[in-house]
Amino acid sequence: MIITKTGLSQMWLNVSILLSLLTVVLIDGWIEPRVNKIEKSISENYDQGEEIPAEFGLLIKKKLVPIETAAQLLMIAILVLMVMKPF
């Protein structure tokens, strides 16, 4: 991946690009399908006027929060790499 003639010879840039691609895969491949599944389950089981039960909150905490936290940490790492350029 290190190509010196096109300007990709700096390791911080290569790592940032890889982390960005990983973040996109994480969001599009894991987070979005799970959100759609939960939305579909809520819309099928409950009418417009009813409250959403607490079990869906627990489902979101169990299935979405860890992955979203990982995506947020990846974005922070990308930001640090882009600003600090450590290597």
Image: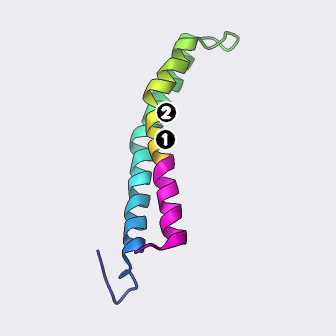
Compared across the picture, whether 61 is left or right of 12 comes to: right
Q: Name the residue under label 1.
A: 69
Residue 17 on image: x %, y %: 41, 66
Instruction: Indicate whether 69 appears above or below 19.
Output: above
Instruction: Indicate whether 72 appears above or below 16.
Output: above
State the quadrant of the C terminus.
bottom left
Q: Distance between the residues labelled 2 and 1?
A: 6 Å
What residue is at 55 percent from the left and 70 percent from the top? 83
Q: Is residue 79 magenta?
A: yes
Compared across the picture, whether 72 is left or right of 51 comes to: left
Q: Which span of residues is magenta-colored?
A: 72-87
What residue is at 34 percent from the left and 90 percent from the top? 5
Q: Name the residue under label 2.
A: 65
Compared across the picture, whether 68 is left or right of 22 comes to: right
Which amino acid does the dot numbered 2 rest on? Answer: Val
Which amino acid does the dot numbered 1 rest on? Answer: Thr
Name the secondary structure under disc 2. Answer: helix
Q: How crowded is mark 2: few (under 14 residues within 10 Å), some or many (20 or more)?
A: few
Q: Are marks 2 and 1 in contact (CB under 8 Å)?
A: yes
Name the secondary structure under disc 1. Answer: helix
Give the main secondary structure of the magenta stretch.
Answer: helix
State the quadrant of the N terminus.
bottom left
Residue 65 on image: x %, y %: 49, 33
Q: Please identify the quarter of the rendering in which residue 6 is found.
A: bottom left
| Most foreground residue, 42 or 4 | 4
What residue is at 67 percent from the left and 9 percent from the top? 50
